[in-house]
Each structure stands twice: as structure tokens, then as C-alpha cells.
Image (cartoon, rainbow, N blue to C red):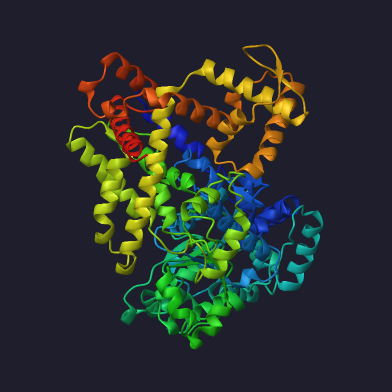
Amino acid sequence: MTQETLEELSREYRDTIPADLREHRSFSAYLDQLYDEPTIARNAHQRVADMFDYYGTEYDEDAGVVEYKLASEDPLNDGENTFYGRIVHESIHEFVNKVKSGARGLGPQKRIKLLLGPVGSGKSDFDRQVRRYYEDYTRSNEGRMYTFRWTNLCDVIPDQDPADDTVRSPMNQDPIVLLPQEQRDRVIEDINEELDAPYTIRNEQALDPASEFYMDRLLAHYDDDLQQVLENHVEIVRLVADENMRQAIETFEPKDKKNQDETELTGDVNYSKIAVYGESDPRAFDYSGAFCNANRGIFSGEELLKLQREFLYDFLHATQEQTIKPKNNPRIDIDQVIVGRTNMPEYKDKKGDEKMEAFNDRTKRIDFPYVLQYEEEARIYEKMLNNADLPDIIVEPHTLEMAGLFGVLTRIEEPDTGNVTLVQKAKAYNGEIDEAEDIDVKKLRDEAAEKAEIGEGMEGVSPRFIGDEIAEAIMDSMHRSRDFLSPLTTFNHLEANIENHGSIPEDRFETYHRYLELVREEYKERAIEDVRHALAYDVDEIQRQGEKYMDHVMAYIDDDTVEDEITGREQEPDEQFLRSVEEKLDLPEDRKDDFRQEVSNWVSRRAREGDTFNPQDNDRLRRALERKLWEDKKHNINFSALVSSGEMDDDERNQWIDALIEQGYSEEGAREVLEFAGAEVAKSEMEE
């Protein structure tokens, strides 16, 4: 083990700190830098918009969605806090588009970005992620921003408290606001000519009341010589966002409804300064409100719609006018991205309230639904396990995917068309579209959007519930000295606790139990498929059968004959053999020509590229050949014996267990699935 030294730790820490964080410079130096780097004067929307691009993007052409790597890869934390699912990245894409529209001054800069979703959908995690990355971004060269402080005030202002000889801009305003508007506009016009960005720099903010007071007194002292004021009493300093310090980031949480006070948002009188300055003096105001702390960055309102209606009125000015009006104090301009979060019950309650019309008009709703792709949902559980101190236990194949499938079934709308089952719809959403099924995913999404009260994925079982049951199943397995977690154990825990979870309404109990049975059936098919692969898999035989199938397909397409393997005579393509393969994919008679042409084109394309034919490389053909081989061999297998190890040769059983281990099973897990699948096949054989 290599031991870290204090010197190394200190050096590593110092490297994370911006070099100019402790420095100060003159306003003149800031002005020079502004002409060289106009982006240091960006507003909050522009800086947040650039932040998303800074960490990288990837365009999903199929979905038409930009995936932002701060969410899809989480580069700062080595992927610990990644987000999964097409529908979630669509929501993130929509959020960023609204921020970018606000950066261009198109309107969303004057709106609350309201993240709406069910509990556990990830909206809070995403909001937290944005705040964390904003902190990091403002520490980088690309994300730099500056503010100012007043100095040597006691030299000019006789009644200035010596403790306030140096006063930082209480709103952390950009130094450019120190210039009068006419002169400021000329500077901004100049720097916009040099700006390489999809937006233009704007700033029409007034100084905060305290800074306005100091500017007025200092200008009077220097006979309105602005240069003297700025050179003698202003220092420019680096500003970095820091939520813990309540600097350029603020998280606001509703307190007791009966005790809500607007000063929590807008600030209040600083009672310790009243005795020094007097009650009406702007220097006696405490800029500690949430809107004040969030200036130049992000305001995050948790459970926003739990606030009283009257308390929400402060958001009207904060959004539309971009100002706040504290009691007994002049208005204060603000510059921030206002993000709110709320769950479904509060949204439904406020949505129908006519008295909330003005507030609702100033919000941009971004739906943050549950994940609707079960394999992506499984990655959420996998992330949960990777981030935990997981016991020495093997998670068996299909465990997390089947748990994810159950979650997705509770969230998607039942399809209207009778020829598509709920499980087929979930598979289609997951990208498992079998051409033989002829499923139109877009049509399914459109139907669900019309049918759902707010949107598909906005109701159902939370990933937290399923994650909790997976955790319980793991601990249960450990207590029973089982070093593996199987789908069967997970199903048992889900079934036992559906009716004990507070977030699941009673009227859904029966439906969710039915969905769990659908998942059990799906798992049964997959378990049998795995055992089928272990018991009947023969690479050489699949290659031979694949070559035979393609010979007959090519002869069929070319209206030609094929040489008989035994007699050597030319004969017509064996239609019975071809259909015996294709039927294993449930391919109907009227779709056989399409499939044969498809595999023919695939073989021709590989031949042009210099690749030899290998049925293993074509997923549909491989599955069809495997299933045919299984049908040919299964009658020679004693499935009843699989359930009892005493009825089977140990060497043969061990050979099959080894084949399952190669598929990712543990030894004990392989024994369980072998017995489970054997029992199911034996049962179906008896029924036949």
C-alpha cells in the first residue's frame, strides 16, 4: 500500500484551486480582460448553457436528442451519477434547450424551469448534478466570472462602521454594472463584435441598493470623477459558485406552511446594523435571502408547489421582471436560472387552481418521467450496487433486467391494439423490435401520450422501491448462505412487499401482482433459453445447419436447384426444412420471403467485405438455428431428471453447469436455473 503524504495531498488540493482566486485586480485590468474575453460578462443563463456543452455532447440521431455527458457519463465522478434511459435524456435535452433559449433572450430566461415527475424519477438528482457541475465550471478558465468589493470606505464616508471598511458586493454582481448605463452599453457593443457565441452579452442591471449608496457617496466626494472612484475604492475578485457557502447557488426548501416568511427569499433587515446606520439606511439590509444568494447562478426550489400561494407571488417578479422587492427596501435586480421541482400530487392540485394562473404562466414545465427501457432501468440498479459496499455475491443473469421489466410494466400505458401485448410493448420500447411482430413504436408512444393523464412514465413503481427490494433480497440470500442473487428470490421479495409500500395505491395491488406474473413468464422463457443453449449448443452443428439453410435460401431466391447432401442429385429447395428454421422465430408464411431476402443481403454484404459466413454473427438466424437444434435434441433429454441430481449422471450435469457458468451464472445459480427450467419444460412436455 502506498501511503499519501501531507505534502502530496496539499499540492493536489492546491491544483484544484483557480490561480487567481485569492488575487484582486483593478477595474481597468478587468476592462482590458473583458475586451479580450467577452464571455466573462455572460449572464447566468448563458453561463449555464455553455456549461452543458463544455463537458461534452453526443447526438443520438435515432432519437433526435443531444445527450450531455455531464449526465450520460458524469466525467467528474467517474460515472457514479450517470442517468439512463432515452426518455430521461429527452427531458434533459428539453431542459437545456430552455436554458439555451433563455441565453438568447427568447423568453425562458423569465420563466421558472419546473421539473415535474413522480417520486424517484431522478429530477432531484439531475438538479443536484447541475449545481455540482456549475461549481466546477466556474472554477475553470472557461467558466470564469468576477465580482467586486468596495475598499477604503471609511476614508470618505464619515459614519461608515470600521468593520465595513471593505464590503463585498452583496449580490456578487458583475463589475460591469459599476459603469453607468450609457457607457456600459458602448463597452457591451464593442465586446459583442468580438464575441464568438450564439448569444450577445446584455446587462441592464442597476447596482444593488447598498452599492448604489456607496457609489453615490464616493462620486460626490470625487466630484463625479468615476475613474477616481473605481481606482481608489474598487477591487475586482474572482467569483466561484459554492452551494455550501451560499454563493451563486442556493437551494430553497419549504418550511412549515404556517410559518413561511418572504424574507427567506428576499432578505431582511440586519438588526445588528440598525443601531449603527438607522433602519432606513440601505447598509442595514441583510442580503441573505435565497434569491440574493443565488445571484449569478442557480436558484433551486425543492418541492416548490408546496409553498403557500401568497408565498409564490415573489416568484412572479423574480421571473418576469427579474427583480425582487424586499420589505422596506428598494427593488433589487437579479440574474439567475430559477429551477423548481415538484411531485405529481402538488402539481395536480395547483394546476386546477384559477388563482395560480399567473404563476403557472411563468413556468416552463419539463416532465421528468420514469425510465421506460427496462435494460436502462436495470443499469440504475447496477449503479446502485456498484456504489454500495456489495457483499461477495453474484447477481445472476436476468435478475436486474427482469426487475426493470416489472418497473416498466407498471409505468407504460396498456396498448390499445389487441395484437400487441404489454410485454411486447415494453420490449419494443427497449429496442427489441422483431420484424415478424410488425410493431409501430411511434404509434404506441402517440397512443400512450393521448391516453395518459399527464404523460407516459409519470406514474408507476419507483426505482427506489425496486432497489430496496433488491437490497433486501441480497441480504436475505446472505442470511441463507446463498452467494448469489437470482430473479426468483427477487420476485419473491417484490411480491411480498407490493402491498406494504406507501407509494403504491391500493387500487393498483391486483394489477401489479398480475404484471409480476407476466415478468415471471418472461423470465421462464429466458431461463429455458439459457438451459437450451447449455444442453443443446453445438457450434459445428449450427454452422452446418446454417450453411444448409443459406444454400436452400439462395436457390429459392434465384429459382434454382440445390445439390442433395446424400444422393448428390439436383433438387428443389427444401421448403419444409426452411420453414422448420423460420418458424422458430414465429415468422408467418407471408413474411418468409422478406426474411430470406434479408439474410441473403446480409451474406452478400459480408462476402463483399471479405468476411466468411458465420451464423453466429446474425442474431435472428442464430436464435432460429439454436431453437431448431433444441427441438431436434430435446426428446432425448430427461427433463424430470434435471430437478433431482440423484437421477442423472454427475459428469453430464457438471458439463451443463459449466456451460451455464460460461453464460455468467454462478455454480449454485446454474444449478437453480437448471432445475427451474427443467421442471418447466417437463411440465410443458407432459401437457403436450
Q: Is residue 603 above or below residue 230?
A: above
252 relative to 55 in the view: left or right: left
Residue furthest out toward the bottom: 355
Give the total of numbered labels. Answer: 0
| Foreground of the two, 6 or 598 | 598
Residue appearing at x 56%, y 56% in the figure: 92
Q: Is residue 631 above or below residue 414?
A: above
| Foreground of the two, 603 or 469 | 603
226 relative to 526 in the view: left or right: right
48 relative to 12 in the view: left or right: right
- Relative image position of residue 57 (x, y in whole percent): 63, 45
Q: Is residue 416 above or below residue 60?
A: below
- Determine if residue 263 is in view: yes
Residue appearing at x 32%, y 69% in the figure: 507
Residue appearing at x 46%, y 29% in the figure: 631
321 relative to 370 in the view: left or right: right
- Determine if residue 285 is in view: no
> Looking at the figure, which quarter contains the N terminus?
top left
- Relative image position of residue 651 (x, y in whole percent): 29, 13
- Relative image position of residue 305 (x, y in whole percent): 43, 74
| Foreground of the two, 33 or 344 | 344
Task: State the image quarter where residue 670 is shown.
Answer: top left
Residue appearing at x 60%, y 57% in the figure: 48
> Looking at the figure, which quarter contains the C terminus?
top left
